Amino acid sequence: MKNPNSGYFYFGKGLGDALIKENKGRFNLAFYMFKKTTYFFNDKADVVYLNRLHNIYFPLRNKFDVVHFTDQTCRLKPYSVKAKKIMTIHDINNVHLKFKPQRKIDAHINKIRRYISYCDMVVTISQFVADDILKYIPEAREKLSVIYNGAEKLSVPDNHTPLYVPEKRFLFTIGLLSVQKGFHLIPALLEGNDYELVIAGIETPHKSTIIAEAEKYNCADRLTITGPVNENDKAWYYKNCSAFVFPSIAEGFGLPVIEAMHFGKPVFLAKYTSLPEVGGSVAYYFDNFEPGHMQQVFKDGMLDYETNDRAAAIMQHAGKFSWESAARQYIELYNELLVTK
């Protein structure tokens, strides 16, 4: 949770809050955290501060009965503690990025394989990620289960407005401005209409490609890249956008999809990795990224959404993903580990 503009931050915050709520005194909880995070769970759990020396020697290696490594980067390594161990794997998306050298993909898989070998249980955040693990690390089969992420139901404070307020109806997306997020594909959807496009997230050199695409489709004056935004601004954009567009080719889950759905918004997604699993039958999908195809999917989807009043069904779908449900499932696994200790 070092970076408040990352998916790991919102996973940690959402699951951590829900574990505190659903624990009901069963466990003494201690969270392993960066000192520089912006959120410490209102002092409702003990905190162990991360120290780089812990990977040489972790002084609390014998203190805990169960240790949960909440993502596959493992700031504290699984071999550094003596306890029952569970690890959540969010993705092995490197295998889906064709521009990655094979040696880097192999190194990535081997590192995760090693971490898995030290753990008693492995959880993935979607069936898609589970299938990836089974394909590349089949020896994990007996340890593996799926627990879907929750997604916070955001709200907008009264009278709140973001720093940038679009003048016209607009499309919204959020995330790291990386090639795999596909934000450079969205300007094509602005051709032949008066929509604006608002993109929020940490900027990278890929920003220039997005701007070039907007210039190609003569909509650069309708493109706004805000950089990172706070929670209230993000919620305002979800609430007020005409649609949420997320043509990503590498997602383990895709929290922004459910966040947008909580507002009843139509979501337009790439038909790749976990997104069809998360968006279900209430999302609209790009089968490919040909501009003409994407434009037709967007046009047909918006017509269906507006004609058939899809907002209620979309919000109902979003309600299936809750942090409380995820926390209860994790607590069940913690209990199972203690029984088999």
Image: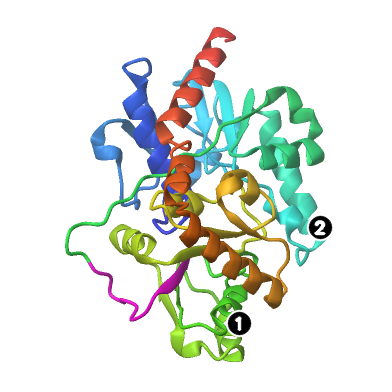
Q: Secondary structure at mark 2?
A: helix
Q: CA distance from mark 1 to mark 2?
A: 27 Å
Q: Secondary structure at mark 1?
A: helix
Q: Which residue is rendered at x = 60% and y = 57% of the image? A: 284
User: Residue 22: which quarter of the image?
Assistant: top left
Which of disc 2 and disc 1 is earlier in sequence?
2
Residue plotted at (66% across, 56% down): 250
283 falls in the magenta region: no
Please, is residue 104 above or below residue 117 in the view? below
Pick the residue in front: 196 or 7.
196
Seen in the image, is 76 located left or right of residue 151?
right
The answer to whether 123 is drawn above or below residue 203 in the figure is above
Say what amino acid the circle numbered 1 marks.
Thr
Instruction: Classify 24 as above or below 151.
Output: above
Q: Amino acid at mark 2?
A: Arg
Residue 178 location (% of width, % of height): 59, 68
Percent of width and height locating residue 58: 49, 33
Residue 103: which numbered mark, if any?
2
State the predominant SS element of the stretch in magenta: loop
Task: Point out which mark residue 209 bears.
Answer: 1
Spot occupied by residue 62 in the image (x, y as percentages of width and height): 49, 21
Q: What residue is drawn where x is 31% and y is 30%? A: 46
The segment highlighted magenta reads 161-174
Question: Alpha-carbon neighbours of circle 1 within 10 Å: few (<14), some, or many (≥20)?
Answer: some
